[in-house]
């Protein structure tokens, strides 16, 4: 497993972990599978952009591996609460730091 792959998994795990901290909030709605996939996909996209990876095949393979590695976390994510504002922030994030801020 390459160090770049491990970095991608670490970033996606951190994103879902931060998202998990929203679970105590009583507002919003239950996260959908699409919400959780968006968080992982955005993390992969931003990480690839920050490492200057542009090959779509490499990005797609990394995303596939990360999603497989995080399948249990994605299911746990679905039990959390999220607001439309949070998900709009995730979609608009242009750096991994911005993504982390959205999920706090």
Image (cartoon, helix red, strand yellow):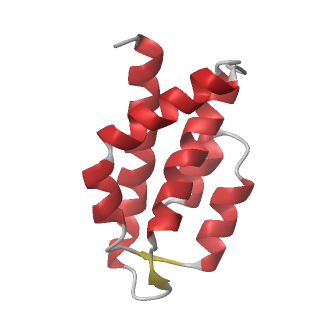
Which image quarter: residue 91? bottom right
In the image, is residue 75 above or below residue 71?
below
In the foreground, 38 or 7? 38
The residue at 73%/44% (across/down) is 94
The residue at 60%/41% (across/down) is 97
The residue at 59%/59% (across/down) is 102
The residue at 69%/67% (across/down) is 88
Residue projecting furthest to the front = 57
- Compared across the picture, whether 96 is left or right of 14 comes to right
- Compared across the picture, whether 95 is left or right of 81 comes to right
Which image quarter: residue 30? bottom left
Residue 35, image x and y in percent?
52, 66
In the foreground, 31 or 34? 34
Which image quarter: residue 74? bottom left
Residue 56, image x and y in percent?
68, 27
Residue 23, image x and y in percent?
34, 73
In the image, is residue 20 above or below residue 67?
below
Residue 101, image x and y in percent?
57, 54
- Compared across the picture, whether 50 is left or right of 102 comes to right
Q: In which quadrant is the N terminus drawn?
A: top left
- Compared across the picture, whether 51 is left or right of 11 comes to right
Q: Report the number of numbered marks.
A: 0
């Amino acid at each position: 497993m390459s160090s770049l792959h491990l970095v991608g998994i670490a970033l996606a795990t951190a994103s879902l972990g931060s998202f998990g901290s929203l679970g105590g909030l009583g507002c919003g709605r239950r996260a959908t599978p699409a919400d959780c996939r968006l968080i992982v996909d955005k993390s992969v996209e931003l990480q690839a952009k920050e490492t200057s990876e542009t090959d779509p095949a490499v990005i797609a393979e990394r995303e596939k591996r990360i999603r497989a590695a995080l399948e249990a976390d994605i299911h746990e994510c679905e039990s959390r609460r999220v607001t439309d504002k949070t998900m709009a922030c995730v979609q608009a994030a242009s750096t991994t730091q911005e993504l982390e801020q959205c999920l706090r």
